[in-house]
Amino acid sequence: MYGRLLLPELQVMLNENDTEGVKEFCDALYPAVTAEILEELNSQDVWRVLACSTPEKQAEIFQFLALPQQIEIVGVIDREPLSKLIEEMAPDDRVDLLSRMDDDHVEELLPLIAQAERRDIRKLLSYPEDSAGAIMTTEYASLPENISVSQALERLRLQAPDSEIISYIYVVDEGRRLQGIVSLRELIFARPTRPLSELINRDVISVRVDDDQEFVAQQMAKYDFVAIPVVDRQNQLVGIVTHDDAIDIMQEEATEDTYRLAAVEPLEDSYLSTSVKTVIQKRIGWLIFLLVPSFLAAKVLEHYEAISDKYEWLVLFIPLILASGGNAGSQSATLIIRAMALESNIQQGDLRALLRKELQLGLLLGSGLALISFFISWAFTAQLIQASVVGLAVFLVVLMGISAGGMLPMGFRRLGMDPALMSNPFITALVDILGLIIYFQVAMYLVS
Amino acid sequence: MYGRLLLPELQVMLNENDTEGVKEFCDALYPAVTAEILEELNSQDVWRVLACSTPEKQAEIFQFLALPQQIEIVGVIDREPLSKLIEEMAPDDRVDLLSRMDDDHVEELLPLIAQAERRDIRKLLSYPEDSAGAIMTTEYASLPENISVSQALERLRLQAPDSEIISYIYVVDEGRRLQGIVSLRELIFARPTRPLSELINRDVISVRVDDDQEFVAQQMAKYDFVAIPVVDRQNQLVGIVTHDDAIDIMQEEATEDTYRLAAVEPLEDSYLSTSVKTVIQKRIGWLIFLLVPSFLAAKVLEHYEAISDKYEWLVLFIPLILASGGNAGSQSATLIIRAMALESNIQQGDLRALLRKELQLGLLLGSGLALISFFISWAFTAQLIQASVVGLAVFLVVLMGISAGGMLPMGFRRLGMDPALMSNPFITALVDILGLIIYFQVAMYLVS
C-alpha cells in the first residue's frame, strides 16, 4: 500500500531520465514493494526502470511480479539483457516463466544463457507441471560427509550466496545420494575440528521429483519444515522446495477447490488479470452441462402434471423443497471435500465414520427443518394436509440431499478423481430432480 | 502413513510396561510421526507413552496432536507432570491449549509453572483471538546493537536452543525497541571483530500485536519471509510469527471462506473431530434463515397464479430458470470473494474493473445460455412462443444473478463485514425470488 504512494516520485525520475535516481530508488526498497509499484506501469516503463539496476537486482524485483505481467515485459526486452535477467532468476521462478513463454522465443534465448544454467533449465522444464520437480529450486547448500566442521563452514561460505535457504544443509555421498541433514545452528556452535559426520541427522524426510505438489506442501505443513529435499529414483538430491512455495501451493489448491465447488474450472492466473474470454471458457462448460438436469426436472414436472393441476398449491412450495435439500446437500459436500483436502492421511475407516455422521445429521437437520416448514406452511395455507405434505417432503429431501452431498465426493475419490469435481451446483441439480419426485410422491400418498 | 504401521509394536511395549523401549521408540521417530501414531490411542495410553520421555520430548510430540485430543489428554495427567509439560511447550502452542481449557483448571496449574513462563502465558492469553499477539511465539533470538560479531555469536549460542528460528536475529535498543534485523548467514561469514551495527538491515517490516492474523500471513506470503517480528504500540519487540503458523493461518482462512460460501459457520477443529451437536449448531442457523426467501418465493408464485394456471407449461421451466441464474451468480460470487481474499491490497478501482467485467460476462454468458435454452425448450415443447419466453427469461435471470453475485460481496466488504458472509445459498435464494418475478413478467409480456 505504502508502495503506491511512491509512484509519482518514480514517474518524475523516469520523465527526467534520471537513471541514477531510479537505481537508488530500487535499491532502497524491498523487491516486493518495488514490484508492487511497477504493477502500475506499462511494460516499456517497467523495463526502463529495471534497466537502471544490475541484472541481480532486476531479477529480484522481476520475480515478485505476477506471471502475466512478466510475460508481457519479456516481450519488450532485447535478447541480450533478457538472457542476463533470466540467468539471475531463481531456478523455480525462471522455469515458471519459460514454461509460459513461446517455445520459439525460449529456443532463441537459450544459446545466450550460460551453459550450466541452460542444462538446469532444460532439466526443470522437463518435469510435469504440478510435480515437486517443477516447483523445486536447485539453489541449496550441500556438503560431502567426510569433512570437518570448519571445512564445512568454509565450503558454505562459497556456496551460500546462491542458496535459497541455509537453515539446513544437505549431506550427500560421492554419487550425490542424500545421506542426511545438518542444521546450520548446530554447525555454528560445534567444535571446529569435529567431523561433520557426527552432526548428521540421517533420518531425513524427502519427497520424490514426481510427487504431486499438493503432497509436497502437505508434508511440509505436517513437519513444519522450512524446506524439504527432493530426490530422484536413485535417491540423488536434485533440489529443495522452500516454505514460500509451500504457501503458494496451499493457496493455489485452496483456490482450485473453492472454484470447483462453484463449478468454475481453475484459472491459471489471478481473477483480476484473467481475460473475459478465458473466464467464459472456464465457466460456460459447467453452466451448459447443468442445463441438462434442469430439463430433466422439467420432464419430472410434466410427469406429475395431473396431480399438480389438481392441487395447485403444490407448485408454490417447489422452491422451498428444492432449496432446503440443495442447501443441506451443499453444506455436507463442502465439509467433506474440505476435510479430504486438509487431511492427507484420511483413511477408509474415517470416511465411513464421516458418512455415519452425515446420516445422523440428515435425520436431525431434516426433522428440524421439516418441523419449522410444517408450521410456517400451516400458517401460510391454513391447511393441515398441505402443511403435512410440505413437512414430510422437506424431511425426506433434506435427508436425501445430505446423503448425496456426503457420498458423491467420496465416490469420486474412490474412482481416483478429484472429490471437489462434484461441484455444489451439480449436487443441487441432482437434488432438484430427486427432490421433485419425492415431493410429488409424498403428495400423491397423502392427498389422494 | 508409515507411522501407523508401527502402532502394534508400540502396543506390545505398553502391554509389557517396557518404559525404556517406549522412550527409545519416541526418540527414534520425528515428533510428527509419533503424534500420528498416538492419535490411534486413548488418552490414558497416550499419557503412558509420553510419560516415558523427558518433558522436552513430551512437549515436542504433544504439540503435533490436534487440539481436541490435547484437551482430552490434559484431563488425565496429574498437575505436577502437566505443569512440566506445559512449561516445555512453545509459547504459541501453549496459549492455544490454555485458552481452550477450563479457566479453573488453568488457574490451578499456573502456580506450578515457573514465574517467567507464567508471566509470558498471562500476557499471550490477553491478546484477542486471531490477532498477531495470539499466534506469535516469544522464543526468538535478539541482540543489542553495540556489540561485535563474535560477541553476537557468543550470545546466540546461549539463546539459540530456545529460539524457534534463527535465520534472522532481531536487534533491539535498551528499551527493547526494534532497530533492525541481521541474517545469521551474514553474521557467520563476517569478520569476528566487526561491529554488529554494520550488518544491521534497518528497513525491517514488522506487524503489530493487534493486527489480524490473516494480514500477518498475507505479509509473510508477500515478502516470502521465514518469520516476521511482532511489535507493540511503542515499537517494542514482543514476539515473532513463523512460517509454519503462516501456513496454518492460510489453511484456516481458506477453510472458513469455503465453509461460509456453503452457508456453514466456521468450525474450531477439523470436521472429523467435531461433534454432531456442534456441527448442527454451525449449520442449522443458516438453513432456517434460508427458509425465509423460499416462503417469499411461494408468495411470488401465489401472486402469479392466474398466469401459471392459464399457461401450465410455465411451471415446467421454473427449475431451469432458477438454476441458471443461481449457478451463474454463485460462480461470480465465488470468483470475487476469492480474489478479495488473495489480494490484500485490492483497490476500489480494481473492484470497479471487476464489476464491469462481471457485467460483460453476464451479457455474454446470459446470451449463450439463453440461446441453448431456447433451442432445447423449442425441441421440448415444439412451441416457438414458449421457447422465446424461456430464452429471454434465462438471459435476464443470468444477467441478474451475475450482477447480484458480483455486487453483494463487494457491498458487504464496504460495510466492513466479511465478503464471504454472502454465502452462495443466499445469493441463490435471492435469485429465486427475483428470478420468478422476471420469468412471469416476461411471460405476461410475451404471451398475453
Image: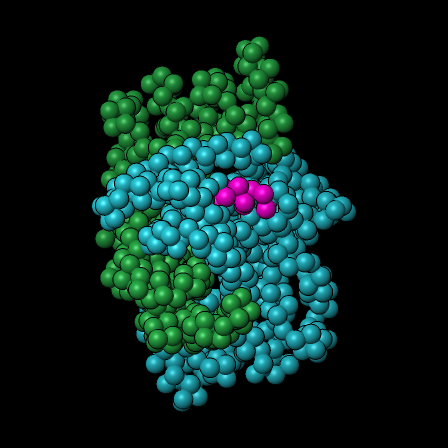
Chain colours: A green, B cyan
Residue B103 is at least partly visible in this image = yes
Residue B269 is at least partly visible in this image = no
> Residue B411 lies in magenta, yes or no?
yes
Residue nearest the viewer, comparing B135 with B128? B128
Specify the quadrant that holds the C terminus of chain A: bottom left
User: At 36% across and 66% down in the image, what residue appears?
Assistant: A310
Q: Is residue B204 above or below residue B318?
A: above
Magenta stretch secondary structure, dominant: helix
User: At 38% across and 76% down in the image, what residue appears?
Assistant: A446
Residue nearest the viewer, comparing B250 with A60? B250
Q: Name the spot of residue B349 as percent of width and height, x first.
A: 56, 31
Region of the chain picked out in magenta, as a range: B404-412
Q: Name the spot of residue B334 as percent of width and height, x first.
A: 45, 47
Residue nearest the viewer, comparing A76 with A83? A76
Specify the quadrant that holds the N terminus of chain A: top right
Residue projecting furthest to the top = A16
Q: Is residue B315 above or below residue A364?
A: above
Q: Name the spot of residue A221 as percent of width and height, x first.
A: 44, 57
Q: Is residue B397 above or below residue A293?
A: above
Residue nearest the viewer, comparing B214 with A176? B214
Residue projecting furthest to the bottom = B16
**Label total for image:** 0
> Residue A358 lies in magenta, yes or no?
no
User: At 65% across and 40% down in the image, what residue appears?
Assistant: B180
Q: Is residue B327 left or right of residue B109?
A: left
User: At 38% across and 83% down in the image, what residue appears?
Assistant: B11
Q: Name the spot of residue A297 as percent of width and height, x first.
A: 31, 57
